[in-house]
Image (cartoon, helix red, strand yellow):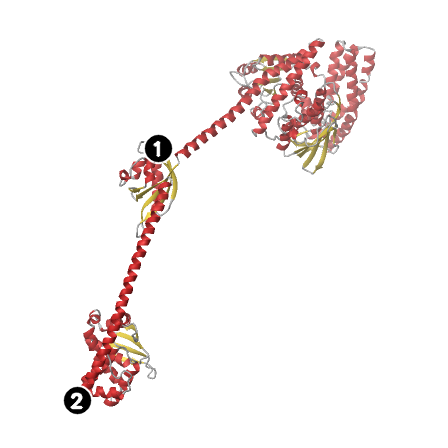
């Protein structure tokens, strides 16, 4: 998993709870990296799971909620770092549709070893977009947070329905309906 | 305190993270550098490759340009409006222009002069725009004005988008070939003209040589009849033989050239093979000329039908083979066997064997003799006259009728030629007497009127002499115009008409006589021509002539025709087989019977009955009267009995009786009279059973008629 996810995650925890909690979850998790992350590095996915579990127990917040708010948080980072992607897409749907075939393609160029989730999109009608998330990382809630922030950024209100087998989070379908 | 520790920890972690990041970035920078180096190298390699490729291309282009420029092929590239874009060196050399004089000019305007070629170019241009190639030949103008024939292979040229933007023409100079082609055509024409000239020459030669030859042969015959001395007879014999050889020679050469020219066609008609054979034998006998040779024929008794085929060709084949046999046989025999090898209802296969006891020829040389101008021994030419064409012609004549000819021969023992021919079967043969008396020169006709149309003095003299010998009246016309004038004034029994004459030829004269109203519209007209071409005979018959006599002719041929056409009763026996004629077999003239009695069978029965009972016994008296030399009584009896013979149609015997009457009038030739009486008695002995049969048939017939 790319280092930026870890650095941003820890920064969010520090911002929201202070460095003490950051230190606590690092110390409590037995991490091969000893919690030393750099945005240009790559680290095992398992470490993120451990950090999340640790944070969840310390804050008494379920992991999905944590992931969702991490999504919200990271959206702003993306917006600041890569404004070009947003400028080229006129609406929220356009942006979401461009992830798989445009943004991820660019990411792969920069980080050939990045393991990215797969998104299939289909317009069910003028106001409805179906978006299927597929990833072994089971981080669909993180994706949900990002989607919510996206619609918000484009100042479009939408209801997002999550469909899928709760026991198998490797594939989740989002039905995004504009109001 | 705790906060300070935490901060320290954070700084320591961030330091470690920064170092890790630096390390990663350095690695990444190194990777980038290496990648860059690789790229640079790749670039250099690529540049080298491109350069190499470009050099190859240039080389290859130079090679092909070199080939094209040295291949005597002029290349010209034009756009869709025929504007010249590029003219290659050879094209410039070919047309005399420099490339810069041509570029931007309209190719059609510069190079074409004939409208015909403009049309061709337009047609080709339409094809090019459709993307089709084409090859064509046109004439183009050289800078200096003369024309060059070129063969052009044109193909479309495409632009980068695949649209036709013009065309490329490969020009090949074919001026030399065209000249050659023209020369060949002219040569062919010359050759064809030469061939025509040769045929014309042969036709002319035929006429020019045959006409005087005719006079020579004719006069020789006549001279022979003027009681010449023994010495003169010898000379005449040589004269006759030499002119005969000359005639054969010309005939051979003509025949051969006719066969070669494919002019001889098989003409089918029904004929009596037995009669043909008997005539042939007589002709051969006359050739034997004192040699100790017996000539005979054996005709297959199974031959009962007339046959349908080319009588003239068969006659010539057999004459050639028989003459050949006579020529090479000193003594012994010449036998003509006619064998029916097979026959069906409609077809008949005949084998003609000509066997001689002559010198024969060696084994291995049998094939040689059918080749032209070949005689088996080189010294033969001195001993045996001939062109060496005879057997070659014979073979071709046989093959013309899809037949075969074979030769088996033993040196000094003799030769047998076998000719196999297939014929269609005709009707049943009837017995026909040979109408030609042996001593034809002494025969007399009954002052019938003959018109002789002939421009050649010698030929005229020849024919007229013969006609007066045969007791015929004649008039003469020297050209077609005169002939027409005479025929308007007088009725003739027969007209001899030469074909080639000044003022108006024989064809035209005949047409006029047949067309305009005159007493001779139906008169027999016999063509006289020195041309032996079959087509001439056909033409003569087709324009209305009755028959054809080829010059030179001997008196016998002339006599045969006169007998044939001046004795209508006799002729009609053979030509018209009316249904009733099976009641009246020969020698009874069925037509005469019909003329007398028509359908009145009972009257015919009465007359036949009277003839058998009263007239026939009276003929016995002739012998007695002749023996007692009471020729006046012979004359009177003949005069009295002659009409009775006509009543039963015995016309030939009647003729003999009339002859007897005139002979007995002035009984100088008593022996002749007795001989004639014998012939008459003989005639009647043969006729009696036939007349008796007819009587029975007539009785049946008259009963039948009465009951119906």
Q: Which residue is mark 1?
A: B147
Residue B5: x and y in percent read 18, 88
Disc 1 crowd rating (10 Å Cα; few below 14, some 14-19, many 20+) is some
Quarter residue B412 falls in: top right
User: Is B608 rendered above or below residue B670?
Assistant: below
Residue A25: x and y in percent read 24, 87
Residue B227 at least partly seen: no
Quarter residue B172 falls in: top left
In terms of depth relative to the viewer, which is nearer, B8 or B600? B8
Residue B619: x and y in percent read 80, 18
- Name the secondary structure under disc 1: strand
Which label was assigned to residue B3?
2
In terms of depth relative to the viewer, which is nearer, B660 or B151? B151
Disc 2 crowd rating (10 Å Cα; few below 14, some 14-19, many 20+) is few
Quarter residue B429 falls in: top right
- In the rendered structure, the residue with mark 1 lies on which chain? B
Residue A110: x and y in percent read 26, 71
- The residue drawn where x is 77% and y is 19% is B680
- Name the secondary structure under disc 2: helix
- Which quarter of the rendered picture does the N terminus of chain A lie within? bottom left
Tell me: B374 left or right of A40: right
- In the rendered structure, the residue with mark 2 lies on which chain? B
Tell me: B284 left or right of B62: right
Residue B373 at least partly seen: yes
- The residue drawn where x is 49% and y is 28% is B191
């Amino acid at each position: 998993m790319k280092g930026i996810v870890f650095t941003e995650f820890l920064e969010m925890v520090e911002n929201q709870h202070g460095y003490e909690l950051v230190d606590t979850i690092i110390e409590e998790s037995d991490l091969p990296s000893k919690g030393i992350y750099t945005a240009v590095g790559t680290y095992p996915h398992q470490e993120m799971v451990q950090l999340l579990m640790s944070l969840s127990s310390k804050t008494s917040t379920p992991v999905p909620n944590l992931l969702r708010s991490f999504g919200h948080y990271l959206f702003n980072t993306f917006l600041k770092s890569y404004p070009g992607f947003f400028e080229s897409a006129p609406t929220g749907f356009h942006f979401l549709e461009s992830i798989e075939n445009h943004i991820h393609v660019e990411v792969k160029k920069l980080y050939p070893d990045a393991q990215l989730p797969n998104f299939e999109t289909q317009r069910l009608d003028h106001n409805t977009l179906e978006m299927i998330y597929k990833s072994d990382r089971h981080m669909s809630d993180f994706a949900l947070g990002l989607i919510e922030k996206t619609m918000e950024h484009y100042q479009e209100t939408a209801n997002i329905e999550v469909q899928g087998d709760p026991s198998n989070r490797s594939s989740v379908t989002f039905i995004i309906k504009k109001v | 305190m705790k906060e300070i520790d935490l901060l320290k920890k954070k700084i320591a972690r961030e330091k470690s993270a920064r170092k890790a990041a630096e390390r990663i970035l350095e690695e990444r920078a190194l990777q980038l550098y290496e990648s860059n180096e690789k790229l640079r190298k790749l670039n250099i390699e690529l540049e080298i490759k491109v350069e190499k490729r470009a050099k190859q291309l240039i080389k290859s282009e130079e090679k092909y340009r070199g080939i094209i420029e040295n291949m005597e092929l002029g290349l010209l590239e034009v756009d869709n409006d025929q504007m010249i874009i590029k003219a290659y060196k050879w094209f410039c050399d070919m047309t005399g222009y420099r490339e810069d004089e041509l570029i931007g000019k309209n190719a059609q305007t510069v190079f074409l002069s004939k409208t015909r070629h403009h049309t061709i170019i337009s047609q080709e241009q339409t094809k090019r725009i459709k993307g089709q190639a084409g090859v064509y030949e046109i004439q183009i103008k050289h800078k200096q004005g003369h024309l060059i024939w070129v063969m052009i292979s044109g193909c479309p040229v495409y632009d980068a988008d695949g649209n036709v933007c013009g065309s490329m023409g490969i020009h090949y100079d074919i001026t030399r070939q065209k000249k050659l082609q023209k020369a060949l055509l002219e040569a062919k024409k010359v050759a064809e003209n030469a061939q025509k000239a040769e045929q014309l020459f042969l036709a002319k030669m035929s006429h020019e040589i045959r006409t005087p030859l005719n006079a020579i042969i004719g006069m020789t015959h006549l001279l022979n009849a003027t009681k010449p001395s023994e010495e003169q007879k010898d000379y005449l014999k040589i004269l006759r033989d030499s002119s005969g050889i000359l005639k054969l020679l010309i005939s051979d050469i003509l025949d051969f050239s006719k066969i070669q020219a494919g002019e001889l066609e098989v003409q089918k008609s029904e004929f009596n093979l037995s009669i043909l054979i008997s005539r042939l034998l007589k002709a051969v006998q006359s050739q034997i000329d004192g040699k100790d040779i017996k000539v005979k024929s054996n005709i297959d008794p199974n031959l009962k039908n007339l046959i349908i085929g080319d009588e003239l060709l068969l006659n010539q084949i057999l004459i050639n083979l028989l003459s050949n046999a006579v020529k090479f046989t000193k003594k012994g025999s010449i036998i003509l066997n006619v064998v029916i090898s097979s026959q069906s209802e409609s077809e008949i296969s005949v084998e003609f064997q000509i066997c001689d006891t002559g010198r024969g020829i060696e084994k291995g040389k049998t094939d040689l003799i059918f080749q032209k101008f070949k005689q088996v021994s080189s010294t033969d030419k001195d001993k045996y006259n001939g062109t060496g064409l005879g057997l070659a012609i014979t073979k071709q004549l046989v093959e013309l009728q899809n037949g075969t000819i074979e030769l088996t021969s033993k040196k000094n023992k003799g030769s047998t030629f076998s000719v196999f021919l297939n014929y269609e079967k005709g009707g049943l043969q009837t017995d026909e007497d040979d109408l030609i008396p042996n001593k034809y020169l002494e025969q007399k006709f009954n002052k019938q009127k003959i018109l002789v149309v002939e421009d050649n003095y010698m030929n005229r003299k020849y024919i007229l002499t013969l006609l007066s010998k045969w007791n015929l009246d004649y008039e003469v016309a020297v050209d077609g115009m005169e002939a027409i004038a005479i025929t308007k004034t007088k009725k003739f029994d027969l007209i001899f008409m030469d074909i080639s004459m000044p003022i108006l030829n024989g064809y035209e004269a005949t047409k006029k006589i047949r067309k305009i109203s005159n007493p001779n519209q139906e008169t027999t007209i016999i063509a006289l021509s020195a041309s032996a071409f079959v087509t001439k005979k056909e033409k003569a018959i087709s324009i209305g002539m009755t028959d054809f006599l080829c010059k030179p002719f001997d008196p016998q041929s002339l006599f045969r025709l006169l007998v044939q056409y001046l004795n209508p009763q006799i002729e009609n026996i053979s030509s018209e087989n009316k249904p009733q004629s099976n009641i009246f077999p020969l020698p009874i003239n069925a037509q005469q019977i019909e003329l007398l009695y028509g359908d009145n069978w009972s009257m015919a029965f009465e007359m036949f009955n009277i003839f058998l009972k009263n007239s026939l016994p009276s003929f016995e008296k002739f012998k007695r009267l002749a023996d007692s030399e009471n020729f006046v009584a012979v004359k009177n009896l003949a005069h009295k009995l002659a009409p009775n013979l006509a009543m039963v149609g015995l016309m030939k015997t009647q003729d003999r009786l009339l002859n007897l009457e005139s002979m007995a009038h002035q009984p100088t030739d008593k022996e002749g009279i007795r001989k004639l009486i014998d012939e008459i008695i003989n005639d009647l002995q043969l006729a009696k059973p036939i007349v008796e049969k007819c009587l029975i048939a007539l009785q049946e017939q008259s009963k039948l008629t009465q009951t119906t």
